[in-house]
Amino acid sequence: MRMKNKRVIVVAIATLLGMSTAVTTQAAGKTATPTKTTAPATKSGQSSTSSFKAASSSSTKPIPAATLVSSTTVDEELPYHIDKGYVYTSSKLNKQAGPAKDFSKVTWYTEKKAVIDRSAQGSGNSVWYYVKSGSGAQSGWIWQGNLEPISEGTFDIAMKNSDYFKNQNIICLGDSITKGYDGYETLDNMGYPNWLNRYLDTTVLNAGYNGAFLCDGGEQETTGDLTPTVNSHNFKNYDVATIAYGTNDYGHVSNSLSDIQTTLRQNIKKMKSDNKNLIIYGILPTTRYDSNTNSDNIIGKGGFTMNDLRDAEAEVYKEFNIPYLDWRKDTTQLITDSNHEYRLYDERLHPSAKTYQLMGREIAQFMINNYPKDKIKTTKKTAKTTTKKATTPTTVTKKVAKTTTTK
């Protein structure tokens, strides 16, 4: 009897031990790190969110493809940005390139407008745009309601060392290329001064004027010519000024290079007399393609070539120790014989909206690189350490401008 009881007890203990082992093993299985063979989605470097998605993708049904109903080419080249929604890799809209935050500093240009049927995804027809970044390196499909014009909302693309210009007022003097004319219409808020506002993160006044001359335009003179523009502004109100004239003097009037240089000198002196601390940058004219021919070495109405004009302006800027941007030397070749037909919207002289952005970026970088060293403010770092508990920074919520639907 005692032997039987002992046997029962041993069996009971063994059973209990077996159950305990099974429970322990099961619990450990829930917390153990997955092996390489069971969890290919947990590769090093992936975020927890992407790891979760990858791990669960095997059990998630694939998203059905949307159907492209119709598509048309978009003629306009106005820039947009995206601050919400997603970018999709194809018109099927079943694979994301990423969320808006991954493209927060990307400038988009629309190339196609399409109606896409999302019935298979539980929705109906909607309008989408195929877009490419300004550099052409990124592309995708974005719903029209998530595209916001650059001129609206928050779009931070300030460059490194743009703080040199913090709280400074900049004025840009020039002709139609400063104004933002594309050969057919003036692009609102799309000229390079508007891009300087973004890249330098400061206040910029666009004082460009369509058809303006550097020198006296005679019967064709405008109120936007260099002299009347300088006379109508008090430069005590500005910290920085850019000067960009000359292409109309080459193509439309017969003033000599000497006349042009004299006028430029007089106006620089006037600007400096208003404000001796005024920082001035010169911007030489871009290349023209009259009759589809590069005008750099062709004599114009004034009896000089475009290269002669640029060299004459450069001489004056050197006299005043003013840095000047020479598109022939100081930058990547923005407008060339091989690309002018699409970089220039009228294929002759005036940049496209996309080219204005590129110009703004080049000019902004030039201004930063040539900012007077003695005016750069340095911030002293304090070596003192404190044991005071750090406070949680206040979260600032940015207002998002009302989204507009593109036409």
Image (cartoon, rainbow, N blue to C red):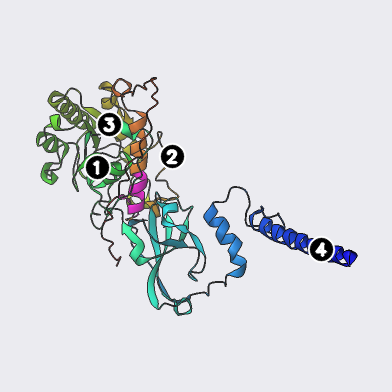
| Nearer to me, 362 or 85 | 85
Residues under numbered marks 2 and 4 in contact, where contact means CB atoms less than 8 Å apart: no
Q: Residue under circle 4?
A: 9
Residues under numbered marks 4 and 3 in contact, where contact means CB atoms less than 8 Å apart: no
Residues under numbered marks 1 and 4 in contact, where contact means CB atoms less than 8 Å apart: no
Amino acid type indicated by mark 3: Tyr
**Marks 1/3: CA distance?**
27 Å
The quarter of the displayed image where residue 346 is located:
bottom left
Residues under numbered marks 2 and 3 in contact, where contact means CB atoms less than 8 Å apart: no
**Marks 2/1: CA distance?**
29 Å
Q: Residue under circle 1?
A: 301
Is 367 contained in the magenta span? no
Is residue 295 visible from the viewing direction of this image? no
Report helix, strand or loop for mark 3: strand
Residue occupying image coordinates x 44% and y 76%? 118
The quarter of the displayed image where residue 387 is located:
top left
Query: Which circle marks residue 332 in the picture?
Result: 2
